[in-house]
Image (cartoon, rainbow, N blue to C red):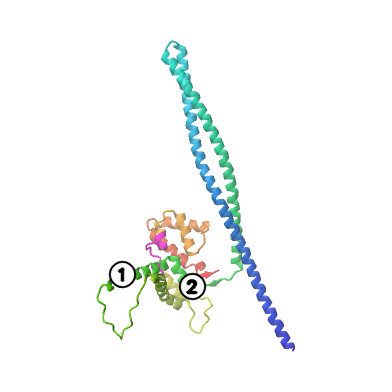
């Protein structure tokens, strides 16, 4: 009986520990979700206000330009009116001068009135802009504070979370996804089905061949099957490449498959084999192709890090990318491929966290 009670207590304690751990994890996820919602709300609130402030800034610049032009016109007319009035006083019998002085005087007063109105409009627009800009700045600060809190929380989770290497299958698929090769597989599968459907339609116009009982009936393809066909086509290509990764990055038969290890063959594969290098060769809309079309080194660094490491680059990393591109000069294509290869071969990419 003592043994039974002991076993029951031990099972209950183990169950309690598991549920306590699950509860703590759920609580943390809830807190993470709250921080994420807080940041999303800050982004949603700040968007229209910042846009309004930008619009008012443009309107204020236009009002300032108009006020300056009207002030200059009023000054010029005032100078001309004063000159005409001076000339009239010297030649009081000159009717043309009398008329000119009167007209210029009236226009000067009208121009001054419009200039004053433009100045008042500018002052009102400036006040409106300052109010909107102040509100936008507060929302910017709120958004940045929410993002900083969220980032700190995720950084803390990284510090205490599991840190394990990608399995060979995960590593292969991650590289295919990051380089854009997976999208190329999908495009190729889609084009292949289009070609087969066209050939199938063309075959209908020809006399049907005599059935051969020794051969299976031909598969009839349909447009409705396109999504599944593309998915299957991609899976076949991915499986073929994955086998190579399993052979290189997986444990040998009979050995643990969960332990991390690095070999010379892995390093040679990443450095010299044409597989990964080929995925990084610019082609259409793959990663290197997109980066090659960009002119701004800052944008190149951001797209590179978001595509491969799924995060924004740090300032030192942005500078490193810009300096490397500048050093390579005209060899931009090679530089982009080398930068991509460096990130794909990095410890950060190889491990999940």
Element at badge 2? Answer: helix
Q: Report x, y in % for residue 335.
A: 41, 60
- Which residue lies at the image location 65% right of the left edge and 73% below the top edge? 21
Element at badge 1? Answer: helix
Q: In this orientation, which residue lies closer to the viewer: 66 or 348?
A: 66
Q: Report x, y in % for residue 42.
A: 58, 54
| Crowding near the residue tagged with mark 1, few <14, some 14–19, many ≥20 C-alpha atoms within 10 Å | few
Q: Is residue 147 visible?
A: no
Quick check: 87 above or below 208?
above
Q: Which residues are magenta?
A: 276-290
Looking at the image, residue 202 sits to the left or right of residue 171; the answer is left
Return the residue found at the far top.
93
- Which residue lies at the image location 48% right of the left edge and 34% below the top edge? 66
- Which residue lies at the image location 26% right of the left edge and 82% below the top edge? 210
Q: Is residue 62 visible?
A: yes
Return the residue found at the far right.
2
Residue 277 in the magenta stretch? The answer is: yes
> Could you give the CA–CA distance between mark 2 and mark 1, rounded to whole angstroms?
36 Å
| Crowding near the residue tagged with mark 2, few <14, some 14–19, many ≥20 C-alpha atoms within 10 Å | some
Residue 152 in the magenta stretch? The answer is: no
Question: Of callouts 2 and 1, which one flags the residue occurring earlier in the amino acid sequence?
Answer: 2
Return the residue found at the far left.
207
- Which residue lies at the image location 47% right of the left edge and 17% below the top edge? 85
Quadrant of the image occupied by residue 147: bottom right
Q: Report x, y in % for residue 108.
A: 48, 24
Q: In this orientation, which residue lies closer to the viewer: 285 or 204?
A: 204
Q: Which residue is mark 1?
A: 198
Q: Report x, y in % for residue 241.
A: 41, 74
Q: Which residue is mark 2?
A: 170
Tell me the quarter of the image containing the N terminus.
Answer: bottom right
């Amino acid at each position: 009986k003592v043994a039974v009670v002991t076993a029951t207590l031990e099972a209950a304690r183990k169950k309690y520990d598991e549920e306590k751990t699950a509860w703590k994890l759920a609580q943390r996820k809830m807190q993470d979700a709250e921080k994420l919602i807080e940041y999303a709300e800050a982004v949603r609130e700040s968007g229209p206000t910042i846009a309004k402030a930008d619009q008012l800034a443009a309107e204020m610049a236009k009002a300032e330009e108009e006020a300056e032009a009207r002030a200059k016109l009023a000054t010029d007319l005032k100078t001309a009116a004063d000159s005409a009035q001076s000339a009239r006083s010297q030649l009081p019998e000159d009717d043309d001068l009398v008329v000119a002085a009167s007209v210029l005087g009236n226009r000067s007063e009208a121009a001054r009135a419009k200039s004053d109105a433009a100045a008042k409009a500018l002052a009102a627009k400036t006040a409106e802009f300052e109010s909107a800009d102040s509100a936008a700045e507060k929302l910017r600060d709120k958004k940045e504070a929410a993002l900083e809190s969220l980032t700190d929380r995720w950084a803390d989770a990284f510090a205490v979370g599991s840190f394990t290497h990608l399995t060979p299958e995960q590593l292969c698929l991650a590289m295919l996804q990051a380089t854009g090769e997976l999208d190329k597989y999908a495009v190729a599968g889609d084009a292949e089905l289009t070609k087969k459907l066209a050939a199938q339609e063309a075959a209908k116009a020809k006399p049907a061949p005599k059935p051969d009982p020794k051969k299976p009936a031909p598969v009839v393809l349909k447009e409705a099957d396109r999504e599944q066909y593309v998915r299957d086509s991609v899976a076949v290509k991915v499986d073929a490449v994955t086998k190579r990764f399993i052979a290189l990055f997986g444990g040998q038969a009979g050995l643990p498959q969960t332990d991390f290890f690095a070999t010379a063959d892995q390093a040679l594969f990443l450095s010299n084999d044409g597989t990964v290098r080929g995925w990084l060769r610019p082609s259409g809309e793959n990663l290197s192709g997109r980066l090659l079309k960009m002119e701004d080194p800052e944008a190149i660094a951001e797209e590179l890090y978001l595509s491969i490491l799924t995060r924004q680059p740090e300032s030192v990393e942005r500078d490193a990318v810009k300096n490397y591109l500048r050093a390579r000069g005209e060899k931009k294509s090679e530089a982009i491929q080398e930068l991509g290869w460096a990130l794909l071969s990095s410890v950060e990419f190889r491990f999940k966290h």
